[in-house]
Image (cartoon, rainbow, N blue to C red):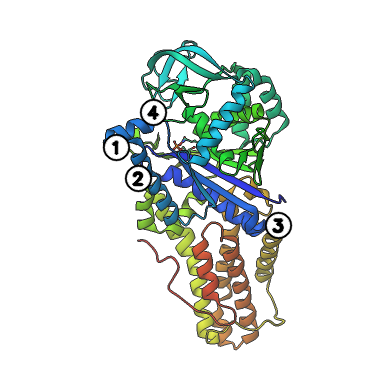
Amino acid sequence: MVKKFYITTPLYYVNASPHIGHSYTTIAADCLARYMRQAIGKDNVWLLTGTDEHGQKIERAAQAEGLNPKEFVDATAVQFKELWKALNIFYNDFIRTTEERHVKTVQRVLEILFEKGQIYPAKYEGWYCTPCETFWMQTQLKDLTCPDCSRSLEKISETNYFFRLSEHQDWLMKYISAHPDFIKPSSRYEEMARFLELNKLEDLCISRPKERMGWGIPLPFSPDHVTYVWFDALINYISAVGSFDDKGKYESQWWPADLHLIGKDILRQHAVYWPIMLYALGLELPKTIFAHGWWMIGQDKMSKSRGNVVNPIDMVNKFGVETYRYFLLRDVPFGLDGSFSEESIIKRFNGDLANDLGNLVYRTLTMIEKYFDGNIPERGVFVKGKQAELIEEKINLINKNGIGLSPSVITDCNFSAALKEVWEIINMANKYIEDTKPWNLIKENKTDELKGFILVLVDAIREVAIQIHSFMPQTSESIIEQLGKDKIKKGKPLFPRIV
Ligand code: ME8
């Protein structure tokens, strides 16, 4: 097991309000961070999130609102913080790329790389996609539309600064092939390996002339230019947790990151630009980059420009934060795309949460109330049937080996499989109640059997509460509280059915 765990989310653009896609990555990161805090101690885990606040997209969004960029980003960054609060996200640090600690580090990185000859000026001609903030060479284009998003491109000709990506392609290819855990899941690993085999990297244009786009971090060696937003933003992962000394040596308690969680849309920047930037700086690489799939609305990716954005706060108001977190992590395996709809949330709610989990807890507490005056029976030697033994075996196994019966389910971000495993206990316990028919035990005065039966259920519920803690912290705590130590404190049903 690792000794420390530094996990990051992307820094989200503040050109628009947060949507469910943003909440997905952050909830997943929160779940892993909570899990790791339990596993290795809370002081050994660092969860970083934040906002990406420079660049043309944001400058234009500010203009459209009639605000200056700083006023605009201040207002949107707050929305992200508010959302994380509403979603019960427990982060250690929230970095904004307009903060001085970040600006200083970016400028230091630029200086170091410039002095090393890794950044150089050159005349640039090419095509630019504003929404993607990406340059394209004529040779990369079929027509004058962006190969990524199909929107129209702008012709650009100017002097800019370039970072020597191309020089390090061989090194990166060797690194990736020697480190199968560097990019996950394996489909994304293959995608990047193939991309590097089939394409020759071009040097990366890392500046923008101020006269065209002024909203960025000034280059220390050329006051007429600001830094390209991607080059700026990636550096947050080191600027938030350390700094460079006078000699250019980077000091940090947390770096390298153990896990960069991202969506598959920004894999290339993380798996190509970022490792090469770090290598050129002489810094260690993150251990793993995990790129998850997309939430789609019908057949379409959710995006502001398509006008199909779902606001996470609306979902929380409708279904509750715990259901929302559960749904996102349970419904779709983390690496794959999923289709988002309220109907699917309602289905999970009524089935997994109300019928399975909620019902198990409610029924068990009601029986303890009715048969034992609310006191949990004392432990003793009771005759057990096969079903009880199987449940106990399962509890012990999960307790010993972790939720997916192996810790890798969590480190491989297999949230859905982990929850499925926990639900097996729930389903076994519910079936055990139905098969045992406790009212008959009462009729036949089989008090010892009844005690044994209740204790198996109490153990099952307690284990479930522990295992779902990182996913649904409030539900877990509420179950533990209702179960009490010796005497139960029955509350309202956890998940009253949505009809
Ligand atoms: O790309 N489904 O920011 P961004 C799932 N600032 N996840 C989604 C999603 C969807 N439909 N839409 C967005 C940027 N995401 C840069 C990142 S990092 C140094 C800079 C999530 O606001 C997913 O994590 O466009 C995706 O990678 C990220 O939001 C993109 O957020």
Location of residue 282 (image quadrant): top right
Q: Amino acid at mark 1?
A: Leu
* Secondary structure found at label 4: helix
Find the distance from the CA under tag 2 to the CA under tag 4. 17 Å
Of all residues, the one furthest to the bottom in this rendering is 445
Tell me the mark number nearer the camera, choosing from 2 and 3: 2
What whole-number distance in Å separates the C-alpha atoms at marks 4 and 3? 49 Å
Query: Which quadrant of the view contains residue 281?
Result: top right
Instruction: Tell me the distance, in whole angstroms, between the alpha carbons under discs 4 and 1.
Output: 14 Å
Q: Secondary structure at mark 2?
A: helix
Residue 443, compared with residue 264, is above or below; it is below
Decide which of tag 2 and tag 3 comes sooner along the chain. Answer: 2
| Mark found first going from the N terminus, 4 or 3 | 4
Q: Is residue 338 left or right of residue 165?
A: left
Quick one: label 3 or label 1, which is nearer the N terminus? 1
- The residue to which callout 2 is attached is 75
Identify which residue, 457 or 30, lies in the foreground. Answer: 30
Q: Which quadrant of the structure image shows residue 423?
A: bottom right
Image quarter in which the C terminus is found = bottom left
Question: What amino acid is found at the position of numbered circle 2 in the picture?
Answer: Ala
Q: Position of residue 71 (x, y in %)?
A: 34, 41
Horizontal and vertical percent for residue 457? 59, 72
Please say if the residues under marks 2 and 1 sit with CB atoms less than 8 Å apart.
yes
Please provide percent x and percent y for residue 122. 52, 12
Q: Residue at x 43, y 33 (%)?
A: 54
What residue is at 60 percent from the left and 69 percent from the top?
Answer: 462
Say whether marks 2 and 3 touch (CB < 8 Å). Answer: no
Nearest to the eye among marks 3 and 1: give it: 1
